[in-house]
Amino acid sequence: MAQKAAKQQAARNTFILKRTHLISLAVNAFFILLRLLVFRTSCTRSTYLLYALLSAPAFTIEFWFERIGRPVIAASGELKKSGEDLEAKGLTEYMWDVLYWTWGCTVVTTVFGDKAWWAYIVVPLYSIWLAWTTFGGMKQGMLGMTGGGGTEGPKNGSMSNRQKKMGKKGGQKMQYR
């Protein structure tokens, strides 16, 4: 039972990485085969240049996930390292979003042509929006810590029912023994 959580994490990461590599292989093979066989006349050098340039983030993210998420097993069969959690919130979640969006753009570009790569502009726009909302939330939190208002106590509208009742009774009194 030792390291049960680590073994579960290792199994989950192995499954996720295998699924990710298979989907990536299918999407990229779909692009290359359809472009070479079906849409041969509309294929130019710029088609493959755009494909390489705009698929690079997905390849980089996939490599990064392989690097941090792959479990390390010793020669004796013992689990040395289970790998980072590939389902973590934050940056990992954002990287999955970029990976999925890249795959979607690749499939749409395969069917509709090179102009569909313009859908990839959503990634930087999403990044800007995410940074703006994160900064806005931090800014609100910082204003709350500084007091933000005047020196008077809480107004009647912001008091809870318990605080209002205590105020009517004359406030909260300390009892000394």
Image: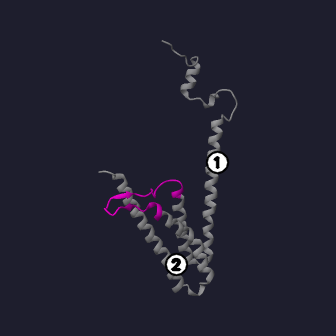
Image-based side of 157 in relation to 95, left or right: right
In reply to whether residue 2 is colored magenta, the answer given is no
- Dot 2 or dot 1: first in sequence order is 2
Crowd tier of the residue under label 2, counting other residues whose Cα lies within 10 Å: few below 14, some 14–19, many 20 or above = some
Separation of residues labelled 2 and 1 (CA atoms): 40 Å
Three-letter amino acid code at disc 1? Gly
* Three-letter amino acid code of the residue under disc 2: Phe
What residue is shown at x 55% (from left), y 21% (from top)? 166
Residue at 50% over, 64% down? 64
**Residues in magenta, as a range:** 66-93
| Residue 139 located left or right of residue 24 | right
Question: How has the structure been colored for display?
Answer: one colour
Vertical relation: 15 (above or below) 152: below
The image shows residue 173, relative to residue 129, as above or below, that is above
The image quadrant that residue 113 belongs to is bottom right
**Mark 2 element type:** helix
Tell me residue 27's x, y (percent): 49, 74
Residue in view at x 36 percent, y 52 percent: 5
- Find disc 2 in the rendering and name its residue: 31
User: Is 90 inside the magenta-drawn segment?
Assistant: yes
Q: Residues within 10 Å of mark 1 (few under 14, many from 20)?
A: few
* Element type at mark 1: helix
Give the percent coordinates (x, y) of residue 140: 64, 42
Position in image of residue 31 (x %, y %): 52, 78
Q: Nearer the viewer, residue 63 or 118?
A: 63
Left or right of 36? Residue 10 is left
**In the current view of this chain or complex, which residue is farthest to the front?**
75
The residue that appears at 69% across and 28% down in the rendered structure is 151
Q: Identify the residue at the far left of this view.
A: 1
Q: Residue furthest right?
A: 150
Discs 2, 1 touching: Cβ within 8 Å: no
Q: Which residue is mark 1?
A: 136
